[in-house]
Image: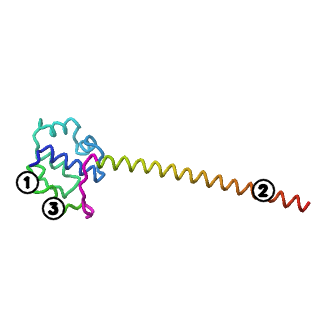
Amino acid sequence: YMTDYQRIKKVLNWYKFLGIGETDTQLAEMMGYRKASLSQVLNGKEALNEKFVNRLCQFDENINKVWVLTGEGDMFLNNSKNSPNGSPVIEIQTEAWNVIKQQTASLAMKDSQINDLVALLNNTLSELKKNLARQEDNVITAVAG
């Protein structure tokens, strides 16, 4: 049995996975709430109500509002664990997902550095070819002279 908090967090994490928002605060604002209001619902200080659930579910029509409110049924209406574009969904723990995101950012930075290095090497090679061509012209001029 999942608590209201766990169900809400699961939906929020799903939205982060889809790229709809990056943080709880950002998602709360997109729902029309402040972070403090979301925290009150998450902490059980504010009762989970239908208005909140409707706003929470507005970003993915496949989220089961009854499940969010009561825990009955499954998180997704079409129960096949597919994303909105139809591709299969694989659940990944938050910690693992954070490591994947960090590695992706690191690899993107390394790709950029490699691209810069290749451009620098191409420029250097081009300059060397020009210098070699000038030297060859000078040798031909000297021999012909």
Left or right of 51 on screen, residue 104: right
| Tally of numbered tags | 3
For the residues bearing labels 3 and 1, Cβ distance under 8 angstroms? no
- Picture quarter containing residue 141? bottom right
Prevailing SS of the magenta stretch: loop
Residues at marks 2 and 1, CA–CA distance in whole angstroms: 80 Å
Query: Residue drawn 9% across and 51% down?
Result: 71
Q: Position of residue 125 (x, y in %)?
A: 66, 55
Q: Secondary structure at mark 2?
A: helix
Q: Over which residues does the magenta segment extend? A: 83-95
Q: Which residue is mark 2?
A: 134
Q: Secondary structure at mark 1?
A: loop
Label 2 crowding class (10 Å Cα cut-off): few <14, some 14-19, many 20+?
Answer: few
Query: Residue drawn 44% across and 50% down?
Result: 108
Q: Position of residue 13 (x, y in %)?
A: 24, 48
- Image quadrant for the C terminus? bottom right
Q: Which residue is mark 3?
A: 79
Amino acid at circle 3? Asn
Label 1 crowding class (10 Å Cα cut-off): few <14, some 14-19, many 20+?
Answer: few
Q: Which residue is mark 1?
A: 72
